[in-house]
Image: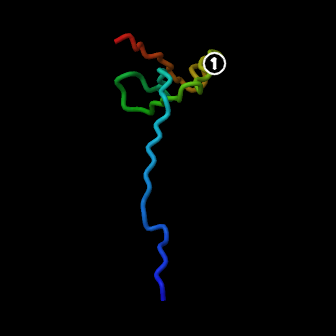
Amino acid sequence: MTESKGLNTCLVFNNQPEPSGWKCYMFGNRPGGWGITYFPEKGQVPNRFVRFMMKVCFDCLWVKEDNND
């Protein structure tokens, strides 16, 4: 009887999306805090109205990072 080779190998794909340069401190969290922070992908940042409504309704703070290092 011949032994068949199944999927015995483990493939790892590390595809990191390009960051957008924005951070969202969610549900009352602020920079330096221990809450939830969301980092959207480039091209997936909500528009100004959505960011404003997230601030009013959920106390989220959107911060654009300055990458002029």
Q: Residue furthest bottom?
A: 1
* Position of residue 28 measured from the top left corner of the image (x, y, whole percent): 47, 26
Work out which residue is located at the far front of the displayed protein and give it: 2
Check the image and report above or below for 17 versus 45.
below
- For the residue pair 40 and 38, the one nearer the viewer reads as 40
Q: From this viewpoint, which residue is outermost toward the top?
A: 68
Residue at the spot x=47%, y=26% of the render?
A: 25
Front-most of residues 20 and 26:
20
Between 61 and 23, which is closer to the camera in this rendering? Answer: 23
The image shows residue 48, relative to residue 32, as above or below, that is: above
Would you name the residue on which mark 1 appears? Answer: 47
Instruction: Give the structural element (helix, strand or loop) at label 1.
Output: loop
**Which residue occupies 50% across, 33% down?**
17
Q: In the displayed structure, would residue 66 be above or below residue 50?
A: above
Q: Colour scheme of this structure image?
A: rainbow
In the rendered image, the quadrant that contains the C terminus is: top left
- Expressed as whole percent of the image width and height from the top left, the position of residue 53 reads 63, 20
Residue at position x 56%, y 20% from top? 55
How many numbered dots are placed on residues in this image? 1
Closer-to-camera residue (20/61): 20
In this rendering, position of residue 4 left or right of residue 48: left
Badge 1 amino acid: Asn
Establish if 3 lies above or below 56: below
Dot 1 alpha-carbon crowd within 10 angstroms: few under 14, some 14 to 19, many 20 or more? few
Q: In the image, residue 32 lies at what x, y percent?
A: 34, 24
The x, y position of residue 58, in whole percent, is: 57, 26
